[in-house]
Image: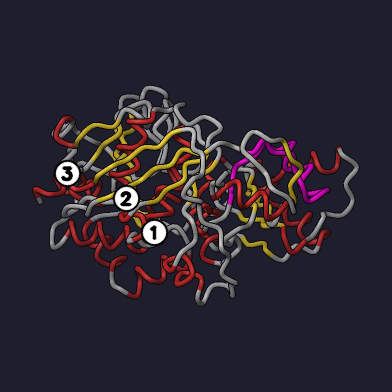
Amino acid sequence: MGATVVEKIFSSRCGRAISAGEVVMAPIDAAMIHDITGPLAIRNFYRMEGTRVYDPRKIIMLFDHQVPADSIAAAENQAFMRTFAAEQGIHNYDIREGICHQVVMEKGLAAPGEIIVGADSHTCMYGAAGAFATGIGSTDMGFVLKFGALYFRVPESIRVEVTGRFAWRVGPKDLILSIARDIGADGATYQALEFGGETIANMEMDGRMTCCNMAIEMGAKAGIVPADRVTYAYFEGHRPVKPVDIYPDPDAIYREHRVYDVADLGPQVAMPHNVDLAVPVEEVAGTPIDQVFIGSCTNGRFGDLAEAAEVLSDNRFSDAVRVIIIPASRDEYLKALRAGLIERFVTAGALVEAPCCGPCMGGAFGLLGPGEVSLSTSNRNFKGRQGSTEARVYLCSPATAAASAIYGEITDPRET
């Protein structure tokens, strides 16, 4: 009987054949905490009578949600984590690099065939590297910090086969929003989404990260793309990675097999207040907006910013819209700076901020007031996600966001 990618990763790391549904204690190759979840995980580590973390080289600590600290409580949390990093000798620690998920990827801290956990739901983004990566709670993370292992029920997989070529100004964000609509917000609960097909094979890492990042929005335990030439090309200059032969078998058993053709796919917009409420942009075009946010771990990379700049062209952003642009990391910021994109955005009227999560979770700045409408390239639009519970958040691609920011209303990017 054949095996899925996830089954093969667990089999490799546990030293025996593992099938979906089994409960196993698996070793952890890397564990990530940030400034929101980190203090809780560390306190749980101490409650479990932890004294030394299992391997300081495998612990990743990044500040990104409230950076720089925007309250006394945030400053206290960050000071607590700095003390812990010094005490434990943790070197994968930084307060200025950017959003945790982007930084983990670009620093090569997640690699093909590894099992990675993070105290954040969008840890599943590292599946773009061919790793099994999933978010866990702070109690589980405290256990991982101490023991370097964790119990898992190995998830079944849904095979997501994607074919066809994207049309002009349509891309991976539109694809994953359409998949979320099809599968539903809880249609993949505790499953792994295994992405494949010619479209995925030809997709660069940026797009794969976007797709894997949003697997959790369907309830998935993980999203994963089997490591291939694109994966290993990405790791050149990031981390020496030995190729691993972890591909799904032709006779692998899946919970479901879904096929999508992007040839006829158009720009998508997810309506409030759920990610699976995606519709073609035409259905919501003309909706007035108060704020546009281009950034987040989903769509804050250089390619996303370049896409937005191409749509912007020589135009200015509408004076009726607050446009907030945040590169996902310092590296991505520098790429955009050197390419002249930052100056272009600022000249057009945008506020360009230092790398961080920003408005994504409504924890730092760019909050929405009652009745306001945001169009965002981030991954969630739950009620109250970006501020007031009386505000509305729509999700879209960078191209749709930029076009809409020009006109002050949701706009089809193919019409600009």
Tag nearer the camera, 2 or 3: 3
Q: Which residue is mark 1?
A: 206
Tag nearer the camera, 3 or 1: 3
The image quarter in which residue 83 lies: bottom right
Q: Where residue 54 sits in the image (x, y, percent)?
A: 82, 55
Q: Which residue is mark 3?
A: 264
Q: Residues within 10 Å of mark 3 (few under 14, many from 20)?
A: few
Q: Disc 3 residue type? A: Asp
Task: Report how many numbered discs are placed on residues in the image.
Answer: 3
Q: Disc 1 residue type? A: Asp
Q: Where residue 269 sits in the image (x, y, percent)?
A: 26, 36
Span highlighted in magenta in the image: 132-154
Q: Nearer the viewer, residue 280 or 320?
A: 280
Q: At numbered mark 3, what does the secondary structure look like: helix, strand or loop?
A: helix
- The reply to whether discs 2 and 3 touch (Cβ–Cβ < 8 Å) is no
Q: At numbered mark 2, what does the secondary structure look like: helix, strand or loop?
A: helix
Q: At numbered mark 1, what does the secondary structure look like: helix, strand or loop?
A: helix
Q: Residue at x 58, y 49 (%)?
A: 133
Q: Look at the image and tell me in which quarter the N terminus lies.
A: top right
Q: Earlier in the sequence, mark 2 or mark 1?
A: 2
Is residue 176 found left or right of 406 in the rendered image? Answer: right
Q: Disc 2 residue type? A: Pro
Q: Residues within 10 Å of mark 1 (few under 14, many from 20)?
A: some
Q: Where residue 404 sits in the image (x, y, percent)?
A: 19, 44
Question: Does 10 sit above or below residue 114?
Answer: above
Q: Earlier in the sequence, mark 3 or mark 1?
A: 1
